Image: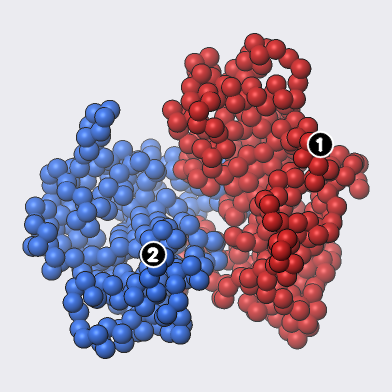
Amino acid sequence: MTALLSIRELHCSFDTTRGKVHAVRGVSLEVNAGETLALVGESGCGKTTLARCILGLQRPDSGHILLDGQEMVGLSRRAMRPFRPDVQCVFQDPFSSLNPRKRISALIREPLDVHGVGTPEERKRRVLDLMERVGLRPDWAERFPHEFSGGQRQRIGIARALALNPRLIICDEPVSALDVSVQAQIVNLLYTLQRDLGLSYLFITHDLTLVENFADRVAMMYQGQIVESGPAQEVWRNPQHEFTRTLIDAIPIPDPDVPMGSGRKAFAG
Amino acid sequence: MAKDTLLSVEDLHLSVSHMPEARILRGVSFDVTRGKTLAIVGESGCGKSVTSLAVMGLLPEGLTKTAGHIRFDGTDLPVTDNEAMRKIRGDRIGMVFQEPMAALNPVYTIGNQVAEVILEHENISRAEARERVIALMREVGLPDPDHIVDEYPHRLSGGQRQRVVIAMALACNPDLLIADEPTTALDVTVQAQIMRLLKGAQAELGVAIVLITHNLGLVAQVADRVAVMYAGRKVEEAETRRLFSAPLHPYTRGLLAATPRPGRRQEGELPLSEIPGMVPSITEDLRGCRFAPRCPLASDICHRVIPEPRMIGATSVACHNTTETEAPA
């Protein structure tokens, strides 16, 4: 079986005034159809650069990005265009990722307009379908982003990402700016959408407990490399790499009987 | 007021000045015991940060305290008298905020900024202050204090900056430290280091800590007591172990259930448990309990009468429908 997304030996670096920064150093990973791969790492580990490469927003130095077996690296903008709908993105900050001057209907319709999907009438109907699917009331369509809470804005962002029927959605810290109860609503929405639409997620996060509750597999990224990967629950129960162990130990567990710095005990059971 | 109570907030009400119907706090009371940690938890907009600002006399312009008392070490805090509060802030009450870069001035060396706190409150020479600063930096675990004292904030990592802010907060041996989301902007490993540092300082100096956070994991690990706030009110307060093992208020229960935790995932179920609906806006004038529209236990009385805090066992809870029989001994 070919993976939906297959990355092989990807390298990406930047020239800065202080010399070369090698952000992604030979990353290989796969995301299968219908699964959630969590990409976990601390700030500056290269996870967002990796996401930008997959989205075609950043040109890697070398390596391969295969979408359903088709090589994406080296394609011209024009050649990449037919593939762009397949990979969409949900961003971390729902306050800065929505244009404040556009109405919700226009924001959700924008990907359809850009790719020239359907007639104006069909697009309008599609927008309403999408709003319903993500739990937004259809009579909110003509409102502006500032009229919505963080959680609702994230729903708008998700509707926008769904507009073109993608196969893979890259979620870059989609719930870390949200409150606990809202986070639960959005995570459950992503889960339900995946079940109903067969989506795959590359879920970038630093919240390790959430990963255990939500992801199928996990890839741990440290200093530009994947240092450990496997089924989420297995990795948590029996972490092999020192970095994974340190990170899991540092998780504050919501249980007064698990003292600070012993997170691994909570997952061992 | 009990003898070992350091800070006592009583029936605090806050409103937007030109909009009296916008009531941000609707009667919040809590005590902080000397040398202990009280965590105030709740979600955005519940009023937890503004409570701490009120205690420090740093309410933003446009917010007014409409009722209530704030007592510190036996006397009323002069929260509206800025000159008097300046003598207390930094000396007897230290503060640590979420965003360390915003708390530091980018054009002064960190040594100067920490020394400023000491020079404001104590009559010592600059050279003596500098020695104190270097010693403090060693205590908060900054590497190479003799050198880092002359560095500017941008040269430090996020965790190091937060250590500098903690050094400033502890510079005059305060009795109370107010930490508002002190680790939210930091990576999880750095977060653990910073919390260890705060707890270490507490053990050594006997400083009381008010920890304002939305992270129930942190609360479980570092707090002695927990106050849970919802939409401008305190809905529950208990000793930490009790709150986690026997939460009484339906909101507290919902919050705990919505928090990701190890081994919760069941095959075929949704990943997390939700609290349906949304927080009411600050202007929304519900006659009864502010959680009632989202509450699984809500009955007729909940929509009509505001529940006052009452004791069930050792827990204070503001709910009509939670009963003693539900609280394990």
Its colouring scheme is: by chain
Local crowd size for mark 1, using a 10 Å CA cut-off: few (<14), some (14–19), many (≥20): few
Q: Residue B168 appears at what percent x and percent y?
A: 64, 29
Query: Is residue A258 among what the camera can see?
Result: no
Mark 1 residue element: helix
Relative to B155, residue B264 above or below: below
> Disc 2 marks which amino acid?
Leu
The residue pinned by badge 2 equals: A98
Residue A132 vs residue B195: left or right?
left
Relative to B123, residue A11 above or below: below
Query: At 81% across and 36% down in the image, what residue appears?
Result: B84
Chain A shade in the render: blue
Local crowd size for mark 2, using a 10 Å CA cut-off: few (<14), some (14–19), many (≥20): many
Judging depth in this view, the residue of A51 and B254 nearest the camera is A51
Q: Residue A159 appears at what percent x and percent y?
A: 35, 73
Q: Residue A35 appears at what percent x and percent y?
A: 29, 66
> Disc 1 marks which amino acid?
Ala
Q: Residue B250 appears at what percent x and percent y?
A: 68, 71
Provide the letter of the chain coloured red.
Answer: B
The image quadrant that residue B238 belongs to is bottom right
Relative to B134, residue B254 above or below: below
Query: At 84% across and 66% down in the image, what residue appears?
Result: B310
Query: Is residue B3 among what the camera can see?
Result: yes
